[in-house]
Image: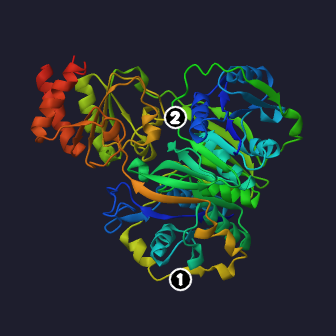
Amino acid sequence: MEILVCVKRVPDTSENEIALNSAGNDIERDELVYSINEPDNYAVEEALQIVARVGGKVTVVTVGGEEDEEILRREMAMGANEGVLITDAAFEGSDGRGIAAILKAFVKKGNYDLVLTGVQADDGAAQVGGMLAAMLDLPFGSLVNSIEVLGGKKLKISREIEGGNKEISEIDLPCVLSIQTGINEPRYVGMRGIRAVASVPISNCSVAELSLDASAVGAAAAKVKRLDYFVPALGKGAEMLAGSREENIERLAELLAAKGGLK
Amino acid sequence: MARIFAYIVHRGGVPDDSAGELAAAAKKIDATASATAIVTGQGSDLDNVCSTLRSSFCEVWKIANDALAHPNAELIRKALVKVLPPGSIVLVAHEHFGIDLAPGLSIKLNAAYCSDVLGMDALDGNDLKVVRQEFGGQVSSHVHCDISSGAVLTIRPGAFRPQQNAALTGTIVDKSGEIGSLSAGRRYLQTIVAEAGDVDITKHAILVSIGRGIQEKDNVRIAQDLADVLDAAVSCSRPVVDAKWLEKSRQVGSSGKTVKPKVYLACGISGSFQHLAGIKGNPFIVAINKNPKAPIFQVADVGIVDDILEFLPELTSKVRELRGVPAK
C-alpha cells in the first residue's frame, strides 16, 4: 500500500509556555521548542504498521521551509521511506484551504492508496484532512483510532465518538483519514536513529512542479486570516496560592476540609 | 444579509444540547436574523427532533432519507450541498460529527471555514470577526473570515449561552424531495460502547485527576496514594490514556467520561476544553501545574504552581497526618 502522511512542525506545548511577544501581535517564538505535531507522529506510526503488515511504502510530506526538514528526517528515522518538503514563497500566508489545495496538487502527482493526517495541529482547526478529501472527491474519516486492512481495496476503521464509544465503518480506498492520538504507541527515535538519516536527501517540491493555480494559495487567496493573539480574561480565575510549598499544602488541606474533601 | 443555517445533531429523537447554542451563535452574527435549523435522519425520531426544534427556530428544514438513519458526514454533506442556497452561513457544533462534516462541506460550498469558534462580533458586510484558541487554549486569537461566498463555522460546545424562553413556533419545511439518491465511500457498520473498566470514576465524590505532568507510568502510584487517603479515585486526561498509563475508562472529557464530583484535583492537567467538557456539577476545582499559563488556572477555584511529582507526596503525608492514617 502506498501511504502518504501529511505532517507539520509545531511548537511543542508540552515543552513550552506559550506567551505573547512584547508587541502583542504574535506569540514569543524565540526560545520555543518545536517538534512534529503529536497526532501526525501517530499517523506516521500507523502508516509504518500498516506497511509492515501488508507491504508498501510510506512517504511523509510537509508544506513549509527549510526548518521543517528536521521533522521529515525524524519520521524517516522512524522508518518512513521518503520525505518531501513542499516549499515556495508563493505558499506563504495560506489558510487551511490553501494548504489543502497544495497537498491536493501533490497527491494528484502520485498514486497513493491512503492519505493520513493528524486529527489537528497547533491551531486546533482540524481542517486540512477533511478539506483535502473533499477536493480529491475521496471518502474521509476523522478521529480515526483503529485501521484494519480488508480485501478488495477497503479498510475497516474506528472513529472516536462521544463517551469513549467507537463508530465502526467500512471505507473504500483510496481515502483520506485523520488520525487521533492513542491509536498506537509510536516507536522511540534515539539520537543514533536521527544521526543515521542526517544526510539522506529530502526531495523539494515547488509550485512549478505542481499543477496548481497560484491564485488559489498564499495570503491573497486566504478567506480566513488571523488578526492577532491575545490572552483572554476568562471567568474569575483561580485563587492562586503563592506561599512556600509547605504553606500551600497547609492552606489546601484547610480548603479541602471545608469542601468536604477530608471527612 | 447571508442566510444562517444551523445543522442540528440528535440522538434518540432528542436534539443535542448544542441546538440552542447554535441559535444563540446565529444571533451574535446578526441579532435581527432568524437561523434555520436543518435536521437529517428518518422515521419518528426525526419528526420528534423537528417538533422540539420549533420552539428555538423560526424554520426547521427536515431531510428524511433511509440512507441517513445513521449520521454519515459524506452523505449529509451531499444532501446539504443540494439544499443550501449560495452564500449561506452554516453553523455546526464542534464535536466528532462536526469535525467529520464541516471542513469538506466548506470546500463543496466554496465557503470560508473557521472551526472551534468561541465568540464573535456582529457581521459587518462580508467581514466576520471570530475568537478562537490555539496551542491547547494557552492563547486566543481574533480571526477574520471573508464570508462573501458563505461560511461554515464549527461552534465550541458551551461557548454560547442558549436564549431562555425563545418560545417560537417555527415552521417545519420538508426538503426530503430535493435530495435524490445518496451513496458514500464510507459505510457505517456498528457502534461499540466503551467498556466499564475496574473503577467507576463517575461514582466518586473526590477525584485525583492526572495529566501529562505525571510524566511516566510508575508515577501514577503517587496519585493513587493521595486518592487512597482521600477515599478518592484516580482519573485522568487524554495524554495519560494515549500513553497507556491508565485505562480509557479513567478518562474525563468529551471523548471519555462525564463526572460530577464534589472536589476535582487537576494534577498536571493543562485543561483543554475537551477535558473540561467532562467535568459537570460545578465541583471545587484545585489545579496544580508547573506551567503558570496552563488554561486550567482560568477555571479552577484554587491554583498552585508546582511540580506534582514533588507536591502530591507531601500533600498525601499532610492528609495522612490530619486524618490520623498511619504512613505506609
Image quarter of residue B47: top right
The amino acid at mark 1 is Pro
Chain at numbered mark 2: B
Mark 2 is surrounded, within 10 Å at the Cα level, by few (under 14), some (14 to 19) or many (20 or more) other residues, namely many
Q: How many labels were placed on the picture?
A: 2
Distance (Cα) linking label 1 and label 2 = 50 Å
B128 relative position to B12: left or right: left
Q: Position of residue B146 (x, y in %)?
A: 62, 56
Of tags 1 and 2, the one toward the viewer is 2
Residue at the spot of label 2: B160
Question: In the rendered view, would you say B325 is above or below A147?
Answer: above
Q: Position of residue B112 (x, y in %)?
A: 65, 54
B22 relative position to B81: left or right: left
Q: Which mark is residue A201?
A: 1
Chain at numbered mark 1: A
Q: For the residue labelled by badge 1, is the local secondary structure a helix, a strand or a loop?
A: loop
The amino acid at mark 2 is Phe
Q: Nearer the viewer, residue B327 or B78?
A: B78
